[in-house]
Every structure is written in C-alpha cells, then in structure tokens.
DNA sequence: TATTGACAGTTAGAACTCGAACGGTTAGAG
DNA sequence: CTCTAACCGTTCGAGTTCTAACTGTCAATA
C-alpha cells in the first residue's frame, strides 16, 4: 500500500461501513419495540420537535414526501402519532407523538448516544474533535437537505 | 459551541449526511441507466469480481442473502447478469455480468471516483489522509461483515 | 450407509423508498 | 374577483429490504 495509489478501501467506503454499523448498533433496541429504523428515527424526532409538518420531516430524514406519508401511516395505525390540521394553513398537517408514542420511544436518544459512543470508542478526545472538524468541513459545502435548527 | 457539550450535529449525523450526499452524487449517472443504487453497486462489483457467489455479494454489500437474491433477480430479468452453477458445489451459484451488463455499467467506477472526489474536495491531501486514518481506526474494531480483500 | 448439521439460495409477507400523477389549499397577479 | 402558480399531502405501481421458513446440497460422524 504505497502513497500514490488510492487505498483499497476508500474513505467513502469506510464511511458507509460506519453508517451501517451505527444502524446495526441500535437495531436491538429498535426491534424490541417492533419499530423499523426509520420509524424510530421519525418518532424520536417528533418527540423533540412536536407539531412538525410532514414536509420538514421529509427534509431532515432526507426522504420524499411520499415516503413520509407511508411511514407515518404505519405509526398512526399503531396509535403512536397523531396528525392534526391545526393552524391557519389547512394544507399542512402538524404531527404529534401520542403519549403511547412518547413512552415507546423513551430512551431512544440515550440508546443512540450509546451507539455513537461505542462506535467512536477507538478514538480519544482529540481525535474525535479532529474527525468532527473534518466531517463538518465536508458537509459545510454539501447541498443542504434543509436541516432544522 | 464550546468544548464540553456535545456538538449540535454529532459526528455520526455528519457521517450519515455524507453518505447520503454520496448517493445523491451518483444518482444522475445511475438513473440514466434505469438502475437503482444497489443494483449498480452489485453490477459494478461483479464486473470487477466475475464469478462471485451470492454469499460474497451479500457480505460486501452488507445485506442479507435474501436481498441479494431479489436484487439479482431484477438484474437477471434484464439480461445484465447470469447465474451459473459451475464448479463442484452445486449449492453455490457463480454470478457473471453479461456483455450487456458490462457495457451498461462501464464507467461506473470512474463516476463513483468523481463523486468521491467532489465530496472530498474541501479537504487537502493531508486532511484526507487524516480522515482516512481516523475512519480506518474506527472500522478496525467494527464487526466485520466479511469484506473481501 | 444413515444421520445430523451446516451451508447456499429461494420464497412469502410486510414495510419502506421513489417518481409521477392527482386533489385541495393558499397566495399573488391581473 | 378570478385565474394561475406554488405548495402540502396522498395514492399508485414497481422495486428493494428485512425476517422467517423452506428446499437442496455437502460433509462429518457414527
């Protein structure tokens, strides 16, 4: 492995691999609750951002409006969320997690944080900062999928 | 943004974002050929590794044997690949890209390399090496999905 | 030889993703 | 005030993913 040939495993390969590992890490927690990864992510987001409209959910999950529509259908069928057309604009629907939804997803953020911790375990604090800075540098010029905040 | 509170956007968030961007970057090229991201990846792999058995494909794409089965069905229906049970073991099927498949996917690796290049553009050479080292350090202790060389 | 267990791949069923087309709603232009 | 364009969400159809159950094949052992 010399310097002027690209590494056998590119950075982006590694990156996808880590993303996959992250999914796997949270999988046990999620499957205990009979959720899919996407459902848990959406539900977790709704607890933190009650009353979001579907369009925003599509943006932060980087999927389409159509996907959100079907995704929420699954959650609504189980009584984990509610869609209300409150507000002046009756086009948009504000989505809320029900108490059952809140309870089911309770601890999700902690579980995700633990997963992150276990994945980043090989790195010391300085290295984590370096990694974060490098990643932030990359994303700073990426097409923004309309992130909230 | 001070040092002892976790960043608003965690490294793993950024990482998923970049993964998403990579998908998007190659999307035009892929959709011109009426392939999905997964199909193109599998087909590209088969051109580079003719005669792989499905089990290996599942390993490197980090999916299940069942997913590979359906994925290849789609490619086979279009005549882009062939499955042959050559060899001593009649359980396993060696998969080959047909000439049509080879032609369709021609340039895929270059397109992916361009996508990678455009994503890593904000980093200079030293930073890229640092990033790659950090990622490699993380993946070195990850559960290995049986990667080939 | 017969049995048992591991392995390769397939199928069935439910869920998600996407693009495209469609119905309501809102706002802005004339 | 009407008409048009933009916007939010849904539905449809095809494709993929997953898990679980199943067929078929090989290999080791008794």
Image (cartoon, coloured by chain):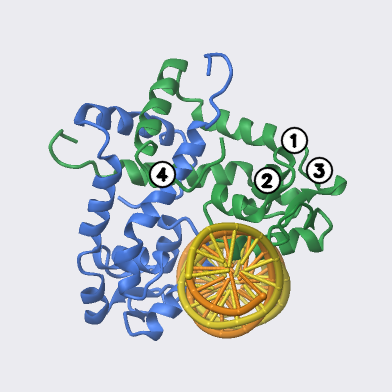
Chain colours: A blue, B green, C orange, D yellow
Q: In percent of the image, x 60 and y 35: which residue is there? A: B115
In this rendering, which labeled residue sits more in front, label 4 or label 2? 4
- Disc 4 and disc 3 in contact, CB within 8 angstroms: no
- Sequence-first disc among 2 and 1: 2
Which residue does the numbered mark 1 point to in the structure image?
B107
In this rendering, which labeled residue sits more in front, label 1 or label 4? 4
Up/down of B138 relative to B123, above or below: below
- Disc 4 and disc 2 in contact, CB within 8 angstroms: no
In this rendering, do the residues under marks 1 and 4 share a single chain?
A: no
CA distance for labels 1 and 4? 26 Å
Side of A106 where A90 appears, left or right: right
Which residue does the numbered mark 2 point to in the structure image?
B28
CA distance for labels 3 and 1? 10 Å
Which residue does the numbered mark 4 point to in the structure image?
A18
Which residue does the numbered mark 3 point to in the structure image?
B102
Secondary structure beneath label 3: helix
Q: Position of residue C23 (x, y in %)?
A: 61, 83
């Amino acid at each position: 492995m010399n310097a002027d040939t690209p590494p056998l495993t590119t950075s982006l390969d590694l990156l996808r691999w880590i993303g996959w590992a992250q999914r796997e890490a949270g999988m046990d927690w999620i499957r205990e609750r009979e959720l899919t990864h996407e459902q848990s992510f959406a539900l977790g987001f709704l607890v933190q951002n009650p009353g979001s409209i579907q369009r925003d959910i599509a943006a932060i999950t980087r999927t389409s409006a159509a996907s959100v529509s079907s995704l929420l259908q699954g959650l609504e069928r189980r009584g984990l969320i509610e869609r209300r057309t409150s507000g002046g604009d009756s086009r948009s629907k504000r989505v809320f997690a029900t108490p059952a939804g809140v309870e089911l997803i309770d601890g999700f953020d902690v579980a995700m944080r633990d997963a992150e911790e276990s994945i980043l375990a090989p790195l010391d604090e300085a290295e984590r900062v370096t990694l974060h800075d490098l990643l932030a540098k990359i994303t700073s010029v990426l097409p923004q999928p309309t992130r909230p905040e």
